[in-house]
């Protein structure tokens, strides 16, 4: 149980998917100017990640041992279909949420985070539970990074930024500072 | 004023064409991948085997050759149940001299360290309870500090001949006890992880190693008879 | 699009529409694997291979693919090339493959590649598509090397593991760690923005006709 908890916490803060592994950067850089949106995108991410983790485990255990070279293609196909289905489900269940999430859902498809999770999970040989905790931790980490970036950007909207640093450069420097701060989580769970 | 021409609706692409396109593309992709896979898989396997062999040689201090043993049902055996995949079982490597006498066992294991999992392979002689050597296989510890566990030769060389179970002590606080390992200043957590990996692996495997060594004379006789 | 010359198709990917530095696509690899020059080089070559191969194939079959399934087909093509690249890198340079980790496989979700197919290769003849792919691939490689060189020199004092800074230089380790990736790219973007500003303001000054008061004089 302790090991599962380590996997979750490690994926969430010690080795944050965005700030340490550089996954999920497109939404992180582009869409993260509002805290509310960031929160919702993060939740959608967690949902898709958990399901993707389950599918990846299923593929790795029952299908791929016979054709390991088809791993990437099968992952992509599964992920794309997953996002499609998620979109349809959300549309049916909560049209309000669907309108708010709008264009973000297709962004999740090309979001390296989902594919990255599937590949990391495979490389580390996680079983079903380990993969699940990895996905939850990773999703929470993504949400955390998105929300932090969004709130910093919201607050700094009125700040006087030098013209050379406006736009992406500033976002990257903020991201670098966040990443630096998160490095402090290393050694969190080690016995002193 | 003539009425504008009627808008021609675009002819619907028949479903079979959509499926056929994807099917053909999928089949072509499959063929190409199988071909490249056949080409590269043997090279990749060979690279992995060479790297493992080099690591085993290093930590067992250059034995003549080594056997691969598998942990099956809480016991060491050199034969897997038929049809089983070797990758599913924990492996232990037994180094042997030219005439077949055992040098020691090489064990690989990993535990979470400061940043991420640290994987280590070490050589162990159950007869003398001493380690023969240690090599870090995988580590993402902090460059310049934690990565000294693999780059600092004085740290690594300590593991030649130290007695199990290991005890980590801060540098300059050692009492000369043969179980002691000096931890790297500024990287005590990474050092402690290496020690933990070895101690935990031995705690799990020692009973199996002892029972295998006890039954080894039978194995040795078989080898001499070959 | 067809009014552009072949040279333009080739050159614009290299700088003026550089995929990483100007269009901000393909950031994941640009930040993740540029901690050494060797890694940047191998990643750049792998991406170049995937980009060129898929642009060629997409342009070849563009008439045969119905519109509804074009994205899926392009992704299939790209994924195949990426798998080939992944297996080849693992066979040829296993140590670098280990350092690159999952990122060779993640080339497949690099928006830059799908973007090129959508925007160009699916609508243009093979020759032009190849030129476009070459240009974009070279531009990507240049960006990767810019990042990799700065990060390895400052963070390790070496290029390709050869010491380039004499003396007892204490490396700024942060640069080969994740924050260094973000900071280095941010710094490069600021340098480019500064250089672009200087160029535009100089051009503006040159354009003013004689006798028109500048802001300073009018104040």
Image (cartoon, rainbow, N blue to C red):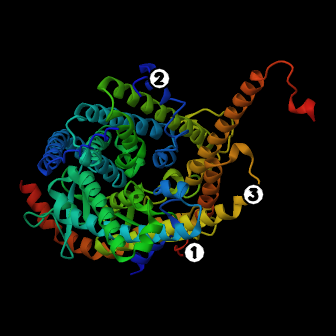
Instruction: Give left or right: position of A159 versus B33.
Output: right
Please tell me whether residue A105 is drawn above or below residue A8 in the rendered image: above
Relative to A57, is B32 on the left or the right?
left
Please tell me how crowded label 2 is: few (under 14), some (14-19), or many (20+) other residues with Cα within 10 Å. Answer: few
Disc 1: which residue: A192
Foreground: A76 or B35? A76
Is residue C209 placed above or below A1 in the rendered structure?
A: above
Q: Is residue C85 above or below residue B48?
A: above
Position in image of residue C183 (x %, y %): 62, 49
Q: Quadrant of residue C158?
A: top right
Q: CA distance from mark 3 to mark 2?
A: 39 Å
Could you tell me which chain the residue with mark 2 belongs to? C
Q: Earlier in the sequence, mark 1 or mark 3?
A: 3
Q: Residue at label 3?
A: A159
Look at the image and tell me whether residue B178 can be seen.
Answer: no
Relative image position of residue A84 (x, y in whole percent): 31, 62
Front tag of 1 and 3? 3
Between C134 and B101, the one lying in front of the other is C134
Residue at disc 2, secondary structure: helix
Marks 1,2: beta carbons within 8 A? no
Reading the image, the residue beneath label 2 is C8
Q: CA distance from mark 1 to mark 3?
A: 41 Å
Image label count:
3
- Percent x, y of residue C194: 70, 36
């Amino acid at each position: 149980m302790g090991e599962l908890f380590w996997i979750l916490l490690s994926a969430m803060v010690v080795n944050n998917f965005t700030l340490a592994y550089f996954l999920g950067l497109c939404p992180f850089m582009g869409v993260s100017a509002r805290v509310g949106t960031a929160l919702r995108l993060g939740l959608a991410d967690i949902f898709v990640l958990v399901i993707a983790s389950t599918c990846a485990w299923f593929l790795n255990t029952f299908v791929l041992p016979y054709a390991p070279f088809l791993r990437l293609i099968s992952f992509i196909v599964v992920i794309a279909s997953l996002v499609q289905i998620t979109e349809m489900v959300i549309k049916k269940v909560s049209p309000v949420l669907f309108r708010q999430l709008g264009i973000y859902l297709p962004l999740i498809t090309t979001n390296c985070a989902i594919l990255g999770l599937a590949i990391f999970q495979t490389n580390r040989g996680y079983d079903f539970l380990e993969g699940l905790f990895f996905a939850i931790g990773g999703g929470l980490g993504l949400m955390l990074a998105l929300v932090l970036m969004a709130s910093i950007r919201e607050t700094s909207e009125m700040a006087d930024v030098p013209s050379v640093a406006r736009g992406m450069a500033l976002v990257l420097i903020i991201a670098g500072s966040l990443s630096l701060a998160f490095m402090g989580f290393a050694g969190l769970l080690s016995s002193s | 004023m003539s009425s504008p021409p009627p808008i021609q609706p675009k002819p619907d692409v028949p479903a079979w064409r959509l499926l056929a396109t994807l099917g053909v593309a999928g089949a072509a992709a499959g063929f190409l991948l199988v071909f490249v896979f056949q080409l590269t898989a043997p090279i990749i396997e060979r690279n992995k085997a060479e790297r493992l062999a080099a690591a085993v040689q290093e930590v067992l201090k250059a034995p003549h050759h080594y056997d691969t043993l598998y942990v099956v049902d809480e016991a060491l055996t050199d034969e897997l149940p038929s049809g089983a995949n070797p990758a599913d079982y924990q492996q232990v490597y037994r180094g042997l001299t030219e005439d077949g006498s055992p040098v020691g066992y090489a064990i690989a294991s990993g535990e979470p360290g400061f940043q991420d999992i640290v994987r280590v392979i070490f050589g162990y002689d159950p007869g003398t309870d001493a380690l023969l050597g240690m090599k870090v296989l995988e580590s993402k510890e902090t460059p310049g500090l934690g990565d000294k566990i693999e780059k600092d030769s004085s740290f690594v060389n300590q593991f030649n001949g130290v007695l199990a179970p290991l005890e980590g002590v801060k540098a300059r606080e050692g009492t000369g006890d043969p179980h002691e390992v000096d931890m790297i200043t500024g990287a005590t957590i990474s050092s402690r992880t290496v020690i933990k990996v070895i101690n935990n692996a031995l705690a799990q495997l020692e009973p199996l190693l002892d029972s295998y060594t006890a039954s080894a004379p039978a194995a040795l006789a078989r080898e001499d008879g070959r | 699009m067809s009014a552009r010359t072949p040279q333009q198709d080739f050159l614009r990917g290299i700088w003026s529409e550089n995929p990483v530095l100007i269009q901000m696509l393909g950031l994941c690899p640009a930040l993740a694997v540029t901690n050494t020059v060797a890694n940047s080089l191998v990643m750049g070559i792998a991406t170049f291979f995937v980009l060129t191969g898929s642009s060629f194939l997409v342009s070849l079959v563009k008439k045969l693919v119905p519109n509804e399934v074009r994205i899926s087909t392009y992704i299939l093509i790209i994924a195949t090339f990426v798998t080939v690249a992944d297996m080849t890198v693992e066979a040829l340079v296993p140590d670098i493959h280990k350092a690159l980790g999952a990122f060779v496989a993640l080339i497949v979700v690099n928006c830059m590649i799908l973007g090129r197919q959508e925007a160009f290769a699916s609508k243009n003849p093979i020759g032009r598509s190849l030129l476009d792919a070459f240009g974009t691939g070279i531009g990507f490689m240049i960006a990767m090397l810019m990042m990799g060189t700065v990060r390895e020199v400052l963070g390790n004092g070496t290029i390709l593991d050869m010491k380039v800074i004499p003396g007892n230089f204490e490396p700024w380790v942060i640069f080969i760690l994740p924050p260094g990736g973000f900071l280095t790219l941010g710094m490069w973007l600021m340098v480019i923005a500064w250089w672009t500003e200087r160029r535009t303001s100089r051009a503006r000054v040159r354009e003013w006709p004689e006798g028109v008061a500048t802001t300073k004089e009018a104040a």
